[in-house]
Amino acid sequence: MDYVPIDRNALKNLLELPQPDDQVQCEYIWIDGTGQGVRSKCRTLDFEPKDSSDCPVWTFDGSSTYQTQGLISDMYLQPVAIYRDPFRRGKNKLVLCEVYKYDKSPAETNKRHSCKKVMNMAEDVHPCFGIEQEYTMLDSKNYPLGWPRIGYPSPQGPYYCGVGVKKIVGRDVVEAHYRACLYAGIKIAGCNAEVMPAHWAFQVGPCEGIEIGDQLWVARYILERVAENVGIIVTYDPKPVPGGRNGAGANISYSTKEMREQGGIKAINKAIQKLGKQHAQHIMAYSALRGDDNHRRLTGYYETSNIREFMAGIAQRDASIRIPRQVADSGMGCLEDRRHASNCDPYLVTEVIVLTTVFDE
């Protein structure tokens, strides 16, 4: 579907109408049946909710989101996290929801439900995460934004953290997303241009437990909305351009309380050994398509490890697990798992990391 430009100035006088004090717009957000897409719809409350528990349970038509059949189409939206709405501003909110079926069981793509149980079990070790979310911008024809229609951009090299019109495309979208996340209350830690032109990354965290999944999904939603406003497509495809270009991942920094304390490198190395023993199982969980599309990225080239092998190293970007240089120097900190595809579900991947490193013996 082609982008249809809208003259936003023609609507400006309506969009800027004052909002009644006792009317608050709450945008309910959920993950659809693909496990990758976000959906949302809005409802009006006659008060300003301060917590997700203040927001009523709602329903939606699951037969239109790949989540159920028409005869039992109603599904439940259970609010679980709340943020300020950077698009409507004021008292208005973004409300992240879990999805439940007609019988109150969690939907198949509701990975938060089981992740929350695991994070509660592990609360004594205080698992902490940071996620670097990579993505690629496309134009309305599904072509990388700013790329020449005939041929390819110059080889990779000048684009990573680059500056200048011949190196960078889409910076205004990135800056708008960053500011919107800050306004919403997302713990966005940074952003940068990546190795391929039109390829960017933002970082969320540090967050403890279930919060990292909540914040990343809402940050993804905000990015989609920002891009929607200017007719740009965001793709989390782990290898959007075949051949000699970098793919897109979601590198995860992870630590427990023990790892962050003096001498924590011992706990880090122990966790790495456990992750290595479960490499195949983790690969299956590290992509939206259960590992089937991550093989296009994890080739052992272009700053990736080989999907069939497990290796760890200090400051190695072609390793499965990288120990950051400063962690090796200080003997404590975190590890970075670099195997995740950009389209991974943060609930699923953080759950399996904690299960393997905290509970597997």
Image (cartoon, grey):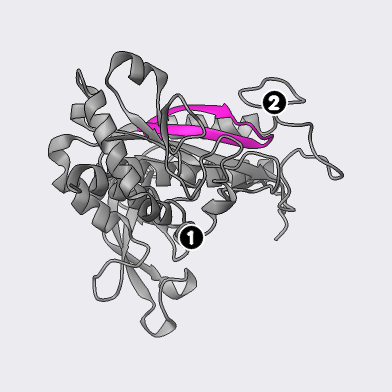
Query: x%, y% of residue 276?
Result: 34, 44
Q: Which residue is disc 1 drawn over?
A: 289
Instruction: Tell me, yes or no, whether the highlighted magenta stretch contains residue 359.
Output: no
Task: Check disc 2 and report its element: helix, strand or loop.
Answer: loop
Work out whether residue 71 or residue 325 is closer to the camera in this orientation and state it.
Answer: 325
Work out whether residue 23 or residue 189 is closer to the camera in this orientation and state it.
Answer: 189
- Mark seen at residue 80: none
- Visible in this render: residue 358? yes
Image vertical order of residue 76 relative to residue 225, above or below: below
Q: Kindly give the residue lying farthest to the top in the view shown.
A: 329
> How many residues crowd around disc 2 within 10 Å: few (fewer than 14), some, or many (20 or more)?
few
Q: Which residue is disc 2 drawn over?
A: 157
Residue at figure coordinates x 60%, y 42% from the top left: 247
Q: Is residue 177 left or right of residue 208?
A: right
Question: CA separation, marks 1 and 2?
Answer: 30 Å
Work out whether residue 178 or residue 52 is closer to the camera in this orientation and state it.
Answer: 178
Task: Check disc 1 and report its element: helix, strand or loop.
Answer: loop
Which image quadrant for residue 30? bottom left
Q: In this view, does 121 lie to the left or right of 13?
A: left
- Amino acid type assigned to the residue bearing label 1 in the image: Leu
Whether pointer 1 and pointer 2 mark residues with C-beta atoms closer than 8 Å, the reply is no
- Amino acid type assigned to the residue bearing label 2 in the image: Gly
Query: x%, y% of residue 254?
Result: 32, 34
> How many residues crowd around disc 1 within 10 Å: few (fewer than 14), some, or many (20 or more)?
some
Residue at figure coordinates x 75%, y 31% from the top left: 155
- Quarter of the image for the N terminus: give it: bottom right
Image vertical order of residue 172 relative to residue 138, above or below: above
Magenta range is 184-205
Work out whether residue 186 or residue 208 is closer to the camera in this orientation and state it.
Answer: 208
